[in-house]
Amino acid sequence: MELLKRLYAINSKSGREDEIKRFILSSLSHIALDIKEDEFGNLFITKGKAEVYPCVAAHLDEVHMPSARIIVEIPPTICAVNTEGTRVGLGADDKNGIWIALKLLEEHECIKVALFVEEEKDGEKAGCRGSKACDLAWFDNVGYILQCDRKGANDYIVQAKETPLCDYDFIPTELLRKYKYWPVKGGNTDVAALKRRGFDKPCCNISCGYYNAHKSEEYTNIDELKNCLNFVSDIITYYKNIDNNI
Ligand SMILES: [Zn+2]
C-alpha cells in the first residue's frame, strides 16, 4: 500500500492541488497516456483507443489544512497522526478514489480517468467547482462514469440528493452480491454536478472504504478499499464484454 500512503502524505486542501497532481503525473510516467489539464486544473487522462470508454472519477482535493502527517497502518486500517501523536485527517476522501483510478489505469487497456479540483465546500465557496466548470465534450465518448467518493463499504449511490445518476439495475446483481454492495440514495459529488449539467450516461458514486471523512478521526479500511477496486474493475470488464458481444 506504498502508493496509497504516499498519496495520504500529501496535503491537497481545495485550491492547493498542485503537489498531488505532480505526484500523480510522476507515478503514471511509465504508462502511455494522453493527459490534459484544463484551465481550472482538472486532470483528464485517456489510455488506449476505443469508440466508447469506461470512465472513473475522483476528486483531487481534501478539506484538511496542511500539517505534518505520519501515516499509521494498523491492519486492516490506516490513519494519520501529527508529530505530537494526535490524530489528524488523512484525506482518504478522496485519495482512496485517486488510488483506485491509478490502479485501474495500470490494469485496463482502454479507460478514461477524470480527476477534479475543488470538489469540497470551502468556507463560503460552493463545492464541485472543477466539475461544474469543465468542458463536457471530453465525456462525449464515455459510456458511463464510476466515481469512488463514498464513505463505507457497501453503497453505490444511484441518486444524489434530487439528481438521478443511474438506474437501479445499472450494476448487475451478481456483482453486487459478490462484492456486497447495494444501491442507495446519497449526497453530492462530481458525477451529480456533471449530470445536472446534462451528461446523459449512467453514473454512480461508490463506497471506497473511508470513514469519518472531514474529521481528524478519519481512517480507511484497506480490505474495503481493495474490495472497491476489484468491484469497479469487474464492472468495467462486465461492460467491456457486453460491448464486445454486440
Ligand atoms: Zn469526497
Image: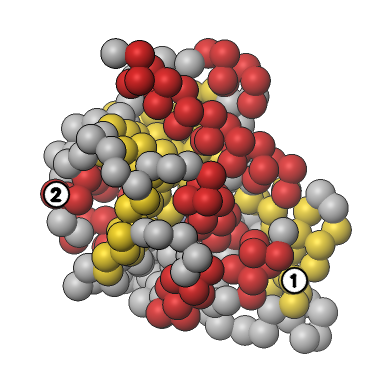
Q: Is residue 89 visible?
A: no
Residue 133 falls left or right of residue 119? left
Q: Residue at x 34, y 47 (%)?
A: 48
Q: Position of residue 75 (x, y in %)?
A: 85, 53
Q: Amino acid at mark 1?
A: Ile
Q: Position of residue 225 (x, y in %)?
A: 65, 45
Judge: label 2 CB < 8 Å from ligand 1. no
Q: Mark 2 highlights which residue? A: 137
Q: Amino acid at mark 2?
A: Ala
Earlier along the polypeptide chain: callout 1 or callout 2?
1
- Quarter of the image for the C terminus: give it: top left
Q: CA distance from mark 1 to mark 2?
A: 39 Å
Judge: label 1 CB < 8 Å from ligand 1. no
Residue 78 falls left or right of residue 205? right
Q: Residue at x 65, y 20 (%)?
A: 178
> Which of the pair 107/21 is nearer the observer?
107
Q: Mark 1 highlights which residue? A: 71
| Quarter-of-image position of residue 74 | bottom right
* Closer mark to the observer between disc 1 and disc 2: 2
Residue 106's tag is none
- Quarter of the image for the N terminus: give it: bottom right
Residue 206 falls left or right of residue 51? right
Label 1 sits on a secondary structure element that is strand
Q: Residue at x 64, y 24 (%)?
A: 180
